[in-house]
Image (cartoon, grey):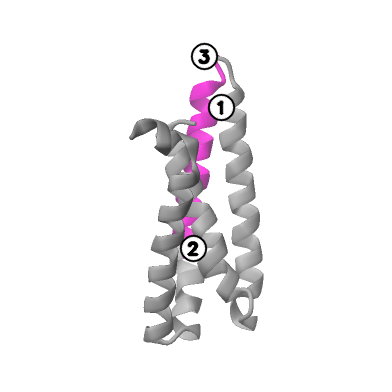
Amino acid sequence: MPPLVCELTAHARAKEAVLYGHLLHDERARSRVVEALQELERIRAALTDLELLPAGDDKWPSRLAALADAVRNHFRVEKVELLAIARQALSKAQATELAASYLAERTRIKADLSCFAESR
């Protein structure tokens, strides 16, 4: 697994487990969290599709560009919409605790991914 894929995977899984898992219980955020989870699933599928393309395939540049657009859009919408809801739904203490939990979970996931073990 390439390092970029590993980084995106660790980020997405930790975010799903920690932030999205918490915000699913908030009525204001639930529908946006479900949409974000669907977006992440489409991004994962695009990553897999890209990884399965043979080296030198003519489709590679356009699929990479589409993936980059999807990731940028996900982060933009998340920042504007979901994190705005999170700021309203979470106290400062909760936000700090979730941030620490996210970092710990991302670190744990990275350690579990074979690509990070191989690069050490």
Label 1, residues with CA under 10 Å away: few <14, some 14-19, many ≥20:
some
Q: Which residue is mark 1?
A: 51
Between the C-alphas of marks 1 and 2, the distance is: 25 Å
Q: Which residue is mark 3?
A: 55
Task: Decide if residue 100 is on the left or right side of residue 51.
Answer: left
The image quadrant that residue 84 belongs to is bottom left
Residue at x 56%, y 36% (from the top left corner): 47
Between the C-alphas of marks 1 and 3, the distance is: 9 Å
Label 3, residues with CA under 10 Å away: few <14, some 14-19, many ≥20:
few
Q: Position of residue 34 (x, y in %)?
A: 66, 64
Q: Earlier in the sequence, mark 1 or mark 2?
A: 1
Between the C-alphas of marks 3 and 2, the distance is: 33 Å
Residue at x 62%, y 30% (from the top left corner): 49
Q: Quadrant of the C terminus?
A: top left
Residue type highlighted by circle 2: Glu
Q: Secondary structure at mark 1?
A: helix
Mark 3 or mark 2, which is nearer to you?
3
Q: Position of residue 30 (x, y in %)?
A: 64, 74
Residue 86 drawn above or below residue 46: below
Residue 84 drawn above or below residue 71: below
Q: Secondary structure at mark 2?
A: helix
The residues colored magenta run 57-78
